[in-house]
């Protein structure tokens, strides 16, 4: 796989596995579009002092519907997520690599690195507004 030019060395991490399975992501568009799958670094490089790292180059997804619903509720006050919707997608290995990266609050959180040329929005559909 070929990775975006801004990914740092060793990104994705060697522990990441081929993408597979059902995941959930907050998106702004219905249907989901390419802009819904921009990494945090792509959306706002200055927020990270223009230094990409493994974490800000990955997309956040949840593997548990309750986890994404909890996240949607928590993000309601963040302007860019105010009107977000829950999208469900079925990942496959052509869509990159994924790694379980849970936090204390979001146990089903995963980081997902998408290769150049992949179109992840195609496999996602809105399941909750």
Image (cartoon, rainbow, N blue to C red):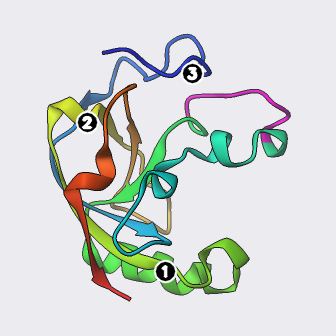
Reading the image, the residue beneath label 2 is: 95
Task: Residue at 41%, 59% (x, y): give it.
Answer: 33
- Residue bounds of the magenta highlight: 48-54
- For the residues labelled 3 and 1, the Cα–Cα distance comes to 27 Å
Element at badge 2? helix
Dot 3 or dot 2: first in sequence order is 3
* Residue 80, x across and y down, in percent: 66, 72
Between 110 and 2, the residue placed more toward the observer is: 2
Between 47 and 124, the residue placed more toward the observer is: 124
* Magenta stretch, main secondary structure class: loop
Asked if residue 37 lies left or right of residue 54, the reply is left
Quadrant holding the N terminus: top left
Location of residue 123 (image quadrant): bottom left
Q: In the picture shown, does residue 106 fall above or below 43?
A: below
Q: How crowded is mark 1: few (under 14 residues within 10 Å), some or many (20 or more)?
A: many
* Residue 113, x across and y down, in percent: 40, 34
Location of residue 8 (image quadrant): top right
Dot 3 or dot 1: first in sequence order is 3
Which numbered disc covers residue 72? 1
Q: Are marks 2 and 1 in contact (CB under 8 Å)?
A: no
Task: Residue at 38%, 74% (x, y): give it.
Answer: 68
Reading the image, the residue beneath label 3 is: 7
Task: Residue at 31%, 80% (x, y): give it.
Answer: 66
Q: Residues within 10 Å of mark 3 (few under 14, many from 20)?
A: some
* Residue 128, x across and y down, in percent: 31, 86
């Amino acid at each position: 796989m070929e990775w975006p030019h801004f990914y740092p060395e060793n990104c994705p991490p060697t522990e990441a596995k081929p993408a597979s399975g059902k995941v959930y992501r907050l998106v702004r568009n219905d249907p989901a579009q390419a802009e819904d799958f921009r990494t945090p670094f792509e959306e706002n490089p200055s927020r990270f002092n223009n230094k990409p790292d493994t974490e800000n180059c990955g997309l956040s997804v949840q593997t548990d519907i309750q986890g994404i619903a909890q996240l949607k509720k928590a993000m309601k006050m963040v302007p860019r997520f105010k009107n977000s919707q829950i999208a469900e997608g079925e990942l496959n290995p052509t869509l990159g690599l994924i790694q379980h990266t849970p936090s204390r609050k979001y146990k089903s959180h995963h980081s997902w690195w998408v290769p150049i040329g992949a179109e992840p929005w195609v496999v996602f559909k809105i399941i909750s507004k």
